[in-house]
Amino acid sequence: MRENGLAMALKKSQLYSSLWASCDELRGGMDASQYVDKCLEERYAEPLPEIMRRVGEFEAKVEQHLANMGLQL
């Protein structure tokens, strides 16, 4: 923050209040629990296909390894 051209120290409580107010403004009328779900969904939605692809590759390698040993899942 600046006041009269001078930098002012920002208290933690002021920072937290400002952050919470910003979050409240962003979520609008949405319930806080719905907002958390939405944020988590957006955070993890993109990497999920990559994770599933890697799981599929791992499963294929395990099945191949077991087949080489004469075993099946």
Image (cartoon, grey):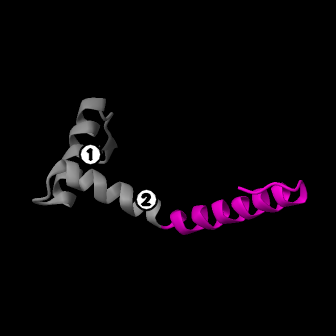
Going by the numbered disc 1, the residue's amino acid type is Leu
Residue toward you, 66 or 49: 66
Residue at image coords 23%, 36%: 14
Residue toward you, 66 or 10: 66
Residue toward you, 13 or 32: 32
What residue would you read off at disc 1?
19
Instruction: Specify the segment rendered in magenta.
Output: 46-73
Q: In which quarter of the view is residue 15 placed?
A: top left
Which element type, helix, strand or loop, lies under badge 2? helix
Which element type, helix, strand or loop, lies under badge 1? helix
Residue at image coords 26%, 45%: 19
Distance (Cα) linking label 1 and label 2: 19 Å
Give the side of residue 52 with respect to residue 30, left or right: right
User: Is 28 placed above or below 16 here?
Assistant: below
Q: Residue furthest left?
A: 29
Residue 64 point in image, percent of width and height: 82, 62
For the residue carrying disc 1, how many other residues have a C-alpha within 10 Å: few (<14), some (14-19), or many (20+)? few
Residue 6 point in image, percent of width and height: 32, 42
Residue 27 point in image, percent of width and height: 19, 58
- 1 vs 2, front mark: 2
Magenta segment's dominant SS is helix
Which of the numbered marks, if any, corresponds to residue 52?
none
Residue 29 sits inside the magenta stretch: no
Q: In which quarter of the view is residue 55 placed?
A: bottom right
